[in-house]
Image (cartoon, grey):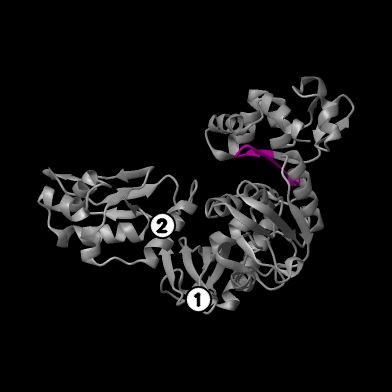
């Protein structure tokens, strides 16, 4: 089966081809037209679900048919699955015409990309993909885990996991059942979970809805994952939660992690207002405007009835550790990107070892590879000094704010020289620089040299 993946790649069906096709579209809704204008049958077949003449396929139709990827329709073929290239993998999932089926299996989504970014990538013995769906996380885990277990309540999802494992030449275990039932009390070095976290009055789509409600499912899985981690093991659980009042955006998550035996990073994106949340999750209904309007109104009535002022969106990252455990909350201003697990490890390390002013001055620091500095200057006779924004190509979504006095120090940071010497050489004042340096260190933008 992996020969099929290679044949498709050699025929040009890969991430670059998809990116180029989409890039030609002037806006998102025009992407299907842009793909069709390129007249590349594999993109039309597997991305759009179009039927195409079999004679135009650059891969033998019988090969794709034997793999269960297409079905013949006279002298044309149509897709049996949606197929999407992602990080040198091919991911199969249900076609869009099943989107409203209760056992629908989605493919690569924004949530699955976020979980992939927020998973700590280190070599481990045993890993768990809980609520695996199409199996994307499990396949990514096989790159650095000796044994990977993928679980799901949906039998159709596990069929896709096995198909995708064969398609990509990967070895993993599958187990059917609800939440942690399939693995009982087994322990793992790494757990990734993308649960049905949506907070709504509905309970009909297995990948999205739960009989417990999205918030309760997330709380249950956070605590359940903590109980099934080996010492120094990590877990990342995507979460949605209810916000009924103000306060820090991660505040409701603190009770979830207290007493779990784990340190925890509570990652909170900007809260989503109920109208936007309801509209986004019901977007597939837009083909029937009346059905869309009814669904959104019903969801909004539910939020008003439950006193839900906003919905929190983010993740909890756990690390099992003996001793006095801690948690830290972070407000994310951007989406997670790239190998964000590296920044997560720096966040854990910084929280483990807080630095005093004297510690900072005696420490050798280095800047993180792939960081970016952005500054906007306003002219009023002269340019006003402006705060610089620091972001990471491989980051969880934090933004580091750097004042003008500290920017000069950052340009001179040397991993072979103590920070205090660098500050002295520049003639800067430690009292003006150290608060920002500490924030950057605690935010994972600086690492010890």
x, y percent for residue 303: 58, 72
Residue behind mark 1: 244
Closer to the N terminus: mark 1 or mark 2? Answer: 1
Whole-percent x, y for residue 185 in the image: 70, 71
**Left or right placement of residue 192 versus residue 48 in this view:** left
Secondary structure type for disc 1: loop
In the rendered structure, find residue 95 and report the number of the disc placed on it.
Answer: none
For label 1, count other residues whose C-alpha is less than 10 Å away and answer few (under 14), some (14-19) or many (20+). few
The boundaries of the magenta stretch are 84-96
The residue that mark 2 highlights is: 346
Q: Is residue 54 above or below residue 5?
A: above
Residue 263 placement, left or right of 200: left
Whole-percent x, y for residue 14 in the image: 63, 32
Q: Is residue 411 above or below residue 36?
A: below
Residue extending farthest top: 55
- Are the residues tagged 1 and 2 within 8 Å (C-beta)? no
On the question of residue 330 being in view, the answer is yes
Q: Kindly report the distance in space between the C-alpha atoms of the residues bearing marks 1 and 2.
A: 32 Å
Say above or below: 338 vs 269: above
Residue in view at x 19 percent, y 57 percent: 433
């Amino acid at each position: 089966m992996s020969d099929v993946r290679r044949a498709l790649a050699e025929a040009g069906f890969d991430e670059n081809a998809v990116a180029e096709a989409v890039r030609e579209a002037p806006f998102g809704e025009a992407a299907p037209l842009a793909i069709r204008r390129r007249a590349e049958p594999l993109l039309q077949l597997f991305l759009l679900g179009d039927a195409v003449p079999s004679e135009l396929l650059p891969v033998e139709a019988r090969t794709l048919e034997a793999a269960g990827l297409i079905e013949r329709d006279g002298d044309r073929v149509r897709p049996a699955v949606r197929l999407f290239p992602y990080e040198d993998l091919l991911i199969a999932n249900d076609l869009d015409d099943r989107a409203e089926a209760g056992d629908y299996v989605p493919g690569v989504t924004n949530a699955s990309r976020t979980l992939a970014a927020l998973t700590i990538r280190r070599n481990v013995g045993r890993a768990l993909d809980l609520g695996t769906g199409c199996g994307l996380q499990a396949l990514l885990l096989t790159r650095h885990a000796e044994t990977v277990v993928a679980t799901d309540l949906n039998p159709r999802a596990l069929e896709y996991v096995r198909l995708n494992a064969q398609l990509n030449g990967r070895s993993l275990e599958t187990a059917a059942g609800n939440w942690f039932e399939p693995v009982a009390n087994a322990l793992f070095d790494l757990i990734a979970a993308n649960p049905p976290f949506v907070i709504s009055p509905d309970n009909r789509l297995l990948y999205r809805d739960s009989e417990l409600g999205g918030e309760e499912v997330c709380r249950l899985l956070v605590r359940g994952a903590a109980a099934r981690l080996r010492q120094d093991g990590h877990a990342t659980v995507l979460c949605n939660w209810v916000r009924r009042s103000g306060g820090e955006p991660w505040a409701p998550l603190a009770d979830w992690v207290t007493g779990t035996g784990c340190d925890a990073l509570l990652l909170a994106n900007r809260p989503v207002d109920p109208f936007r949340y309801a509209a986004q999750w019901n977007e597939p209904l837009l083909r029937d405007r009346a059905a869309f309007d009814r669904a959104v109104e019903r969801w909004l009535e539910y939020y008003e009835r439950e006193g839900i002022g906003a919905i929190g969106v983010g993740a909890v990252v756990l690390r099992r550790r003996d001793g006095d455990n801690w948690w830290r909350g972070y407000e994310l201003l951007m989406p997670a990107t790239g190998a964000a697990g590296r920044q997560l490890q720096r966040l854990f390390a910084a929280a483990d070892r807080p630095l005093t002013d004297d510690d900072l001055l005696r420490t050798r620091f280095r800047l993180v590879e792939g960081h970016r500095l952005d500054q906007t200057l306003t002219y009023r006779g002269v340019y006003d000094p402006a705060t610089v924004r620091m972001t990471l190509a491989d980051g969880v979504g934090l933004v580091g704010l750097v004042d003008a006095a500290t920017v000069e120090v950052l340009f001179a940071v040397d991993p072979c020289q103590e920070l205090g010497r660098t500050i002295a050489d520049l003639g800067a004042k430690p009292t003006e620089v150290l608060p920002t340096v500490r924030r950057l260190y605690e935010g994972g933008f600086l690492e010890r040299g």
